[in-house]
Structure formats: C-alpha cells, structure tokens
Amino acid sequence: MKAKTPSESRTITTDMVLPSETNHLHHLFGGELLSRMDRAAYITARRHSRRIAVTASVNHVAFNTAIPVGSVVTIEAQISRTFTSSMEVFIDVYLEDRLSGIRTKANEAIYTFVAVDDTMKPVEVAPILPETEIEKQRFDAALRRRQLSLVLAGKMKPSEAHELKALFED
Ligand SMILES: CC(C)(COP(=O)(O)OP(=O)(O)OC[C@H]1O[C@@H](n2cnc3c(N)ncnc32)[C@H](O)[C@@H]1OP(=O)(O)O)[C@@H](O)C(=O)NCCC(=O)NCCS
C-alpha cells in the first residue's frame, strides 16, 4: 500500500466554548474537550484509511491549561504512526488570544484508532511517511506508546515490550 504523509489527513477544527460546556469555575469540561478531540482525530483516521475507524484507546491526555468560557479553541489532529490496522493520532489544542490573535498551545492528547470493515474486522491501512522533525520524533516514540498501551490493556506481555523496556535500562 502506498505511504501517505501526515499532512494529507491532517484535520483542523476551530470552535468556541459556550457556558453550557463549562464547570462551576466557567472552564471547559474535560469530557467536552475529549469529545471534540475524538471527533477531529476520527476524521483524520478516516481520511488516512478511507475506512470506518473506531477509537481503540486514549493513550495520553494532558490538561495543562484551563480553557475559559468564550475561548476560541483550535484542535489539530494528525497521524503520527500507523502499524497494521491501527493508527496513532496526535492531537494539539490551541487557544487564540482575543486581542492579538496569537495562538498558544493549551493541551494535547494521543488516541489510537483501528480501521475496520463493515463487520468490525480490522483492516490494513497505508503506512505513514513523516516529513518534519516533530513528525519524525512522534513517529519514533509511537512504538513505545503502542507497547505501553497494549501492556496496560493486557494484550501484550511486559517481557515482549522490548523498546519500552529499553527506556528504563542503563
Ligand atoms: C478496536 C478493536 C477493533 C480491536 O479489535 P481486536 O479484536 O482487539 O483486534 P486485534 O487484536 O486484531 O487488534 C487490532 C489492532 O488494534 C490494536 N489495538 C487493540 N487494542 C489496543 C489498545 N488498547 N491500544 C493500542 N492499540 C490497540 C492492535 O494492536 C492491532 O493493531 P495493528 O493491527 O496495527 O497491529 C475492538 O476492540 C473494538 O471494536 N473495540 C470497540 C471500539 C469502539 O467501539 N470504540 C468507540 C468507543 S465506545
């Protein structure tokens, strides 16, 4: 299957935060942000695979910055690596300053999607060809994240997670 670049399936969404989407402190609910990220990541996985894609796992979410009501939030989702049927999608969340228009990174997350056929059977996806330095770094680290996710899900023995184990050696 012909390799594709991350930019071919990159998805960028921009939306605002309404009062009904916030907590008592008038900050965006974490669950609302997870949902928005899942949607953007799903579109990316679908664009890359041209298949139905299902969320297999949420591997990492960092809520580093609270997002106040009225914020303009931009979510960028792109494939960091594919394996056979699974696709790791990296999601960066940015806030836009009202006066200057300057965007700052607020949060990030990493989701794994699996491409499936109509019977929910996993199907092969195209490989990914990272281009930029950050895309290459994310590609390289994705194998360790996959191993960690599979170990935590009880789908891989820790002794088989060689690249992950290597992080803790020396
Ligand atoms: C995701 C799903 C299709 C995987 O099915 P499965 O029977 O475990 O299939 P396999 O063991 O062949 O795994 C398929 C791929 O998923 C990957 N995978 C499965 N669980 C994973 C996890 N927790 N983390 C990372 N990858 C995972 C496998 O590594 C494999 O990847 P590869 O083909 O690239 O090597 C299945 O668990 C499913 O349908 N889950 C429900 C999905 C859903 O409804 N999501 C919405 C949330 S409600």
Image: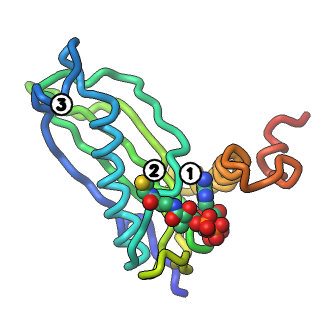
Quadrant that contains the C terminus: top right
Q: Alpha-carbon distance for marks 2 and 3?
A: 23 Å
* Left or right of 137 on screen, residue 154: right
Residue at 42% over, 81% down: 118
What residue sits right under mark 1 in the picture?
138
Q: Do tag 3 and tag 1 residues touch (Cβ < 8 Å)?
A: no
Q: Residues within 10 Å of mark 1 (few under 14, many from 20)?
A: some
Identify the image quadrant of residue 169: top right
What residue sits right under mark 2 in the picture?
90
**Is residue 130 in view from this perspective?**
no
Callout 1 amino acid: Arg
| Rendered-image quarter of ligand 1 | bottom right
* Left or right of 165 on screen, residue 60: left
SS category of the residue bearing label 3: helix
- Residue 38 numbered mark, or none: none
Callout 2 amino acid: Phe
Of callouts 2 and 3, the N-terminal one: 3
Q: Alpha-carbon distance for marks 1 and 2?
A: 8 Å
Residue at 37% over, 65% down: 7
Q: Residues within 10 Å of mark 2 (few under 14, many from 20)?
A: many
- Residue 21 numbered mark, or none: 3
Callout 3 amino acid: Glu
Depth order, front residue of 100/127:
127
Q: Nearer the viewer, mark 2 or mark 3?
A: 3
Q: Do tag 1 and tag 2 residues touch (Cβ < 8 Å)?
A: yes
Quadrant that contains the N terminus: bottom right
**Is residue 148 in view from this perspective?**
yes
